């Protein structure tokens, strides 16, 4: 709170506000303040931007660009009636201001007031006769008014053919995004907007449509005024929520530069979504150093409330290359807006030893990005503590099922596979050896959007447990397929 007050005071000075008792009076340069407010608005800080714009208008009520931007930010946040009043004030005086007419029409489109949008378009054309952009807009609105003569899918294919050949076709991109917004396919709309902006980087209309799609996604998940769209991995499209079953098959192959032979790891799991939470039975198979082994596991993610959910795990194996018993538990909390935190433990029971590992996590969603930090603390029998941890960063693409990720870890990570050397299980020793891991991952959906595939490639540098300060390297590659039904 103290930091927020300091930042607010600093912004007041920058934007030209002066404090006198309980009143804030604008006394700065309106152009400088306008450009600052515009940057804030496009960066997602729309509430702060509106405060600045309103202060400018107290002294410069006829500053059109200021009032227009104020109206646009209101429209982006779904406050269509308020935006309409500001647009109407401008167009009643500036009959030939095409930019404001266009923004006012789009405000009605976003509000799904297509008849009002059509009326505004006709009125704008009475002052800007024959304007091609307005005529194009009128055509698009008319197609909405007269009941979608073509399916969303057919329209999507039509614009995909255009944009795949003509990357800079601004009108085609905008029409394609509108098609998805009107169909309430906000994730697809957001993905198209991001793609369009990669070719048309400074297009304000595309930025507005991106902000609108982000806002609608945030509203679907009970989030307000966020800096971009939040895309946690557990969030999926509405049509996916009816698919409560999932089968996942994973295969990983590890090779080492010395000492150890290659390692193969395979797992198959079935996930069932229930009202109580997700239940995931799993079978793990490993072939390591000419030894086969199977481990049986089950995960349960109980739902306690909108804020809290849990993780419970139990695994059993009679093979020497797996722990005899593996137990895990964790409590997660989704805090307001874009934060997630958890605290829990992992327990590994080996033939001749056992270990309990305390863990937790802190996650942050920012725009299309997700960042997570997870430490592990392991009490050592001699009284010391073994510390390790992992950092995860992901960039979500068109939706929550498509992303690029990077994992970086130091020390022993209990989620990884256990090692064995000869007849000796060395997993206990691994809790305390020096180790670094780096892994890239890419998940994408196939022709059937409910099915996803993940490829990963990683490298490991780790100290030999029997030869301190001597390290080996390992390269790991894997593929995972997920089928929902």
Image (tube, rainbow, N blue to C red):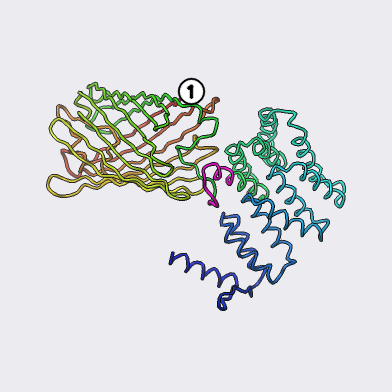
**Image position of 433 (left or right of 392):** left
Q: Position of residue 165 (x, y in %)?
A: 68, 34
Start-end of magenta stretch = 214-226
Residue 420 place in picture, x, y as percent: 20, 30
Front residue of this view, candidates 84 and 292: 84
The image quarter containing residue 394 is: top left
Q: Is residue 450 left or right of residue 475?
A: right
Q: Is residue 51 left or right of residue 276?
A: right
Q: Quadrant of residue 247?
A: top left
Question: Percent x, y for residue 375?
Answer: 30, 47
Identify the residue shown where x is 48% and y is 46%.
Answer: 369
Residue at 27 percent across and 36 percent down: it is 328
**311 in relation to 225, above or below:** above
- Secondary structure under the numbered disc 1 in the rendered image: loop
Q: Label 1, on which residue?
A: 485
Residue 193 x %, y %:
62, 42
């Amino acid at each position: 709170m103290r930091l927020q007050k300091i930042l607010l005071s600093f912004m007041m000075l920058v934007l030209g506000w002066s404090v006198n008792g309980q009143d804030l009076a604008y006394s700065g340069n309106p152009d400088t303040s306008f450009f600052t407010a515009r940057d804030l608005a496009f960066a997602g800080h729309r509430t702060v931007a509106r405060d600045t714009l309103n202060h400018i208008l107290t002294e410069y009520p006829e500053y059109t660009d200021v009032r227009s931007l104020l109206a646009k930010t209101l429209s982006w946040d779904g406050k269509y009636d308020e935006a309409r009043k500001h647009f109407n004030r401008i167009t009643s005086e500036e009959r030939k201001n095409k930019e404001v007419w266009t923004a006012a029409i789009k405000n009605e489109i976003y509000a799904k007031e297509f008849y009002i949008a059509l009326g505004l378009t006709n009125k704008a054309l009475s002052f800007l006769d024959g304007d091609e952009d307005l005529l194009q807009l009128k055509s698009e609105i008319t197609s909405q008014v007269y009941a979608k003569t073509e399916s969303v899918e057919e329209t999507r294919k039509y614009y995909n053919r255009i944009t795949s050949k003509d990357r800079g076709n601004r009108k085609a991109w905008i029409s394609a995004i509108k098609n998805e917004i009107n169909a309430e396919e906000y994730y697809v709309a957001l993905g198209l907007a991001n793609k369009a902006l990669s070719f048309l980087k400074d297009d304000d209309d595309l930025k507005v449509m991106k902000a609108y799609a982000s806002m609608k996604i945030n509203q679907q998940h009970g989030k307000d005024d966020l800096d971009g769209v939040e895309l946690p991995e557990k969030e999926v499209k509405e049509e996916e929520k009816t698919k409560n079953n999932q089968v996942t098959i994973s295969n990983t192959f590890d090779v080492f530069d010395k000492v150890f032979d290659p390692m193969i790891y395979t797992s198959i799991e079935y996930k069932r979504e229930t009202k109580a939470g997700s239940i995931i039975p799993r079978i793990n198979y490993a072939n390591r150093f000419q030894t086969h082994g199977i481990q049986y596991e089950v995960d349960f993610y109980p739902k306690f409330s909108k804020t809290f959910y849990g993780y419970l795990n139990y695994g059993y194996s009679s093979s020497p290359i797996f722990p005899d018993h593996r137990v895990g538990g964790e409590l997660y909390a989704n805090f307001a807006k874009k934060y997630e935190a958890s605290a829990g433990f992992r327990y590994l029971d080996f033939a001749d030893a056992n270990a309990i590992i305390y863990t937790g996590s802190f996650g942050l969603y920012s725009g299309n990005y997700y960042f997570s930090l997870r430490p592990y603390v392991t009490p050592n029998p001699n009284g010391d503590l073994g510390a390790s941890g992992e950092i995860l960063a992901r960039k979500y693409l068109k939706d929550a099922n498509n992303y690029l990720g990077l994992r970086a870890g130091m020390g022993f990570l209990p989620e990884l596979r256990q090692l064995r050397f000869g007849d000796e299980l060395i997993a206990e020793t691994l809790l305390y050896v020096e180790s670094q891991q780096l892994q890239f991952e890419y998940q994408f959906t196939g022709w059937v959007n409910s099915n996803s595939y993940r490829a990963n490639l990683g490298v490991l540098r780790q100290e030999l447990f029997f030869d301190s300060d001597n390290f080996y390297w390992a390269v790991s590659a894997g593929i995972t397929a997920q089928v929902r039904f």
